[in-house]
Image (cartoon, rainbow, N blue to C red):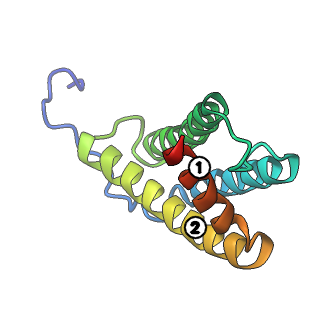
Amino acid sequence: MSTIDSPCHKTPNVSNTQVALRFRVITSVILIVYGLIGYVSGLTDPSKMSTAVSWINSLITYGVMIGGIVMAVKNHRDENQKGFITFGKAFGTGFKTNLIVSIIQAIWLYVFMALIAPNMMDQIMQASIDKAAA
């Protein structure tokens, strides 16, 4: 009996928590390195950042995050689910991937603002005040 004839396709019950760990770490490392490159090169300087640069920065960041989620779900489907994955399992894998990446990024942002660029918050606030006044 083929898969088409059987509406109930059984997939292995493999946890998605540990499956895509490498994509969570890879995505986080890419975002951290991208942020550091932007900081060192001055592209993310709040006092000099234009709207176009801000949009491009956001698109690259979201693209990396979405790419990491897609790769994690695809990896889980191909390696652990025998090429078939339900919406719930795909959503769970993507959600857990995004959650872990967000937690790592929040920790990194705290370390970055506290140790590497402690004056960055003041620059962001001043740039916001200047934009509001203009």
- Residue 52 occupies quadrant: top right
Point out the residue furthest to the right here. Answer: 41
Instruction: Name the residue at 60% across, 42% down.
Output: 61
> In the shown orientation, is residue 102 left or right of residue 111?
left
Q: Amino acid at mark 1?
A: Asp
Q: Nearer the viewer, mark 2 or mark 1?
A: 1
Other residues around mark 2 within 10 Å, as few (<14) / some (14–19) / many (≥20): some
Q: Amino acid at mark 2?
A: Ile
Q: Position of residue 123 (x, y in %)?
A: 68, 60
Label 1 sits on a secondary structure element that is helix
**In terms of depth relative to the viewer, which is nearer, 133 or 92?**
133
Q: Position of residue 68 (x, y in %)?
A: 56, 44
> In the shown orientation, is residue 33 left or right of residue 53?
right
Q: Position of residue 50 (x, y in %)?
A: 66, 34
Residue 130 shows which numbered tag?
1
Label 2 sits on a secondary structure element that is helix
Residue 104 shows which numbered tag?
2
Other residues around mark 1 within 10 Å, as few (<14) / some (14–19) / many (≥20): few
Which callout, 2 or 1, points at the residue further toward the start of the chain?
Answer: 2
User: Do we see residue 16 in this rendering?
Assistant: yes
User: Do we see residue 25 in this rendering?
Assistant: no
Placement of 133 over or under 118, stated as above or below: above
> In the shown orientation, is residue 17 left or right of residue 55?
left
